[in-house]
Amino acid sequence: MTGKPLQDISPSTEKVNESHVPNCSTCTTRHLSICDALGPKELVTFDHVVQHRGFAAKAVLFEQGQKADFVFSVSEGTIRLFRLLPDGRRQIIGFAIKGDFLGTALAEKHEYTAESVDHIRVCRIPRSTFLQMLDEKPHLMKKLHEIAGREIHDSQDQIVLLGRKNAEERVAAFLLSFRERLARVLTRSVTIPLPMSRQDIADYLGLTIETVSRTISKLARDKLIVVVPDGIRILDVNRLVELAEG
Amino acid sequence: MTGKPLQDISPSTEKVNESHVPNCSTCTTRHLSICDALGPKELVTFDHVVQHRGFAAKAVLFEQGQKADFVFSVSEGTIRLFRLLPDGRRQIIGFAIKGDFLGTALAEKHEYTAESVDHIRVCRIPRSTFLQMLDEKPHLMKKLHEIAGREIHDSQDQIVLLGRKNAEERVAAFLLSFRERLARVLTRSVTIPLPMSRQDIADYLGLTIETVSRTISKLARDKLIVVVPDGIRILDVNRLVELAEG
DNA sequence: AAAAGACCTTGACGCAAATCAAGCTCGCCG
DNA sequence: CGGCGAGCTTGATTTGCGTCAAGGTCTTTT
């Protein structure tokens, strides 16, 4: 990190685990991320501009309104992306995980704040460098647009959820979609780890923490899921999907 | 239109006003649309592949789940973009107006349905042709990505609105944002035309028609706006902005 | 091992928006 | 011109989720 936006948030600013970073060519996240668009030679040049960083939980990667100096690729951990209203209401826009691209390529300013939920590792590149690469490598530009297309699609799902679904449908949809995204990244397990807090889930689903808690309890009572430490386990995917889709 | 998805919706399928279309070089919508990225020579080649179409109100341009054969640029009128839940609940994702780009370039299928609100005119291009142009013209790709970036930004605004704002804030925000978009396109007027129905506004804001109606009445009672036939007039922009932002 | 604090759950109650139900306005057509 | 239907408004009532409050569990600290 630049250090600047972090200096006043002491416990969250500690940078960790910066040693022995692998290079791009051997990176296990590569095929999940934007780097998948790069060829062998490009990966080597990428190594020279990319900066690996680790952060403890609650670190701020960048803030809403701040000039976007870097773009990021997540290699480990979970990041919450959110906007704040003047009076403090918070809406979480999404959770970024391994392989996700973060930051705005063409816009000057960040449109939301990104904060680590747990311990994270990211690769970052100066935006100016990235922009130059975009101009030189049409396939990278295309990959980026492909990613943007998926982002638009997901946003629309979230708009439908927030505009027209009730609490139970929202929670069911969240559990399923988070599971789906995790499945791309790790071995598909029956247990879904939920590193974010109930408050985070509430702020993502447009609910309160109490409603999220009650709804999860209800899903468990109805034998659709089981609550386990730091996650849940799905008992009946089909019924959960039915619920989630309305 | 392909004609296929329309054949059973008789009053809405009538295609109108297909005669004497101007060419791309003299198009007054050009600088507002994706075509702004095209040079003089490219505009001429564009003329050969672009198809101008007019539709009466309630025509379906394309449907959720349908294979995306064309991409569109709106030259006149208003289009509602929406998704339906299995039980009929509708969420309007957005309203497209003059200059807006519609359709998915890289995805195979449409993610929402597009239906004309009033009389519209659009230019459409076969998606395969457009894809080919994207591969050949990096500046077009970049322009498209720029448009996608704005779309993501707007979606996030809508997510915050739906997740965290009350009815009054939602309506105020809608009126201001629609005004803002119209201002790009026509001479900024105090009166904001609202071609869409109260039901459309409700389905866009995640409310019911009654709540939208009551809220507009309240804004009028509070002297923030005046209701006029087919639109509203803003009396106090500053207070409306304050309201909209929470 | 006790105390403190963060996070989560559950219950009682309140309220903003949904639902139910008229009645109004305006354009259209016979 | 009069009647009909679509769209809009307004009022009465209900309800799903928010708010307020209390207690539980687990982790961290000392």
Image (tube, coloured by chain):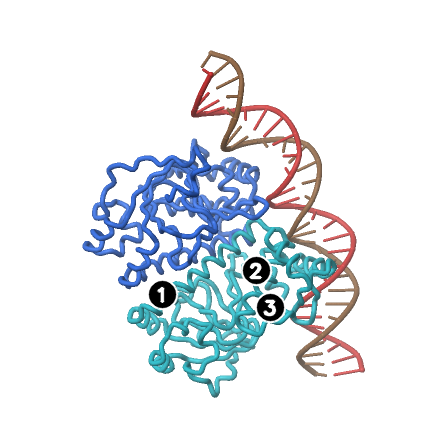
Chain colours: A cyan, B blue, C red, D brown
Of labels 2 and 3, earlier in sequence is 3
Q: Which residue is mark 3?
A: A196
Can you tell which mark lies on residue A142? Answer: 1
Among the 4 quarters of the image, the one containing residue B19:
top left
Comparing A112 with A43, the one in front is: A43
Which kind of residue does numbered mark 1 sit on? Lys
- Spatial CA span between label 2 and label 3: 10 Å
Picture residue at 60% right of the left edge, 68% below the top: A196
Q: Which residue is mark 2?
A: A204
Quick check: C24 above or below B185? Answer: above
Same-chain check, marks 2 and 1 = yes
In the picture, measured across the screen, residue B30 lies left or right of residue B161, that is: left
In the picture, measured across the screen, residue A103 lies left or right of residue D4, that is: left
- Spatial CA span between label 3 and label 1: 32 Å
Q: Residues within 10 Å of mark 2 (few under 14, many from 20)?
A: many
In the picture, measured across the screen, residue B59 lies left or right of residue C12, that is: left
Chain of the residue on which disc 3 is drawn: A
